Amino acid sequence: MTPMLRQNLTLWILVLIGINMRPLLTSIGPLLPDIRAASGMSYTLAALLTALPVIAMGVLALAGGWVDRFIGQNRSIALSLLIIAVGALLREIAPHSALLLSSALAGGIGIGIIQAAIPAVIKRLFTRRTPLVMGLWSAALMGGGGLGAALTPWMASHSAAWHQALAWWALP
């Protein structure tokens, strides 16, 4: 594989990872009435579905450098993607509120770890194009958030149950 082809492939992988970082957060909002009705969650518990991942992301962003040094950057990225996928798959077992909250926490942990690692990867692999690639990474994050909010209601209307639409986000 040529160096240019390898760098372009790496760029596409980074974009795909970026797109996958926000649907776990933004897919909850459009289905919140269904989630509350099926699970019996109070408004306080339902708010934790979006607050827990954000808190975990903040805490793990601080520990991300340590995780990278402890298990290695490639392993921390792979582990993060696995944790995010498990978090999304836990939603298939829903509508139990404890599992929904666990899925939110797992997703936040995975996102927090990987978000600390990716900028270092971009700086290392795209030295001459760091600002451009960081901008593309940021756009992928925001685009994934928009896709999560926009596509989840459609997926829920084409699924047997609302929680299947949430679990579909494990695929990317």
Image: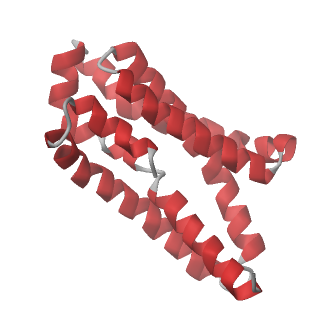
Compared with 74, 83 (above or below) is above
Using the rendered image of the protein, determine whether residue 20 is visible from the camera's viewpoint: yes
The residue at the point 53 percent across, 39 percent down is: 84
The residue at the point 25 percent across, 15 percent down is: 41
Q: Residue 26's x, y, as percent?
A: 33, 45
The image quadrant that residue 61 belongs to is: top right
All told, the count of numbered labels is 0
Q: Residue 13's x, y, as percent?
A: 58, 66
Q: In this view, does 35 lie to the left or right of 50?
A: left
Q: Residue 79's x, y, as percent?
A: 68, 41
Compared with 66, 32 (above or below) is above
Q: In this view, does 142 lie to the left or right of 71?
A: left
Using the rendered image of the protein, determine whether residue 55 is visible from the camera's viewpoint: no
Q: In which quarter of the image is the N terminus?
A: bottom right
Compared with 21, 70 (above or below) is above
Q: How is the image coloured?
A: secondary structure
Camera-nearest residue between 79 and 57: 79
The residue at the point 40 percent across, 14 percent down is: 98
Q: Residue 29's x, y, as percent?
A: 25, 39
Q: Please identify the residue farthest to the right as the structure is shown.
A: 70
Q: In this view, does 15 lie to the left or right of 101?
A: right
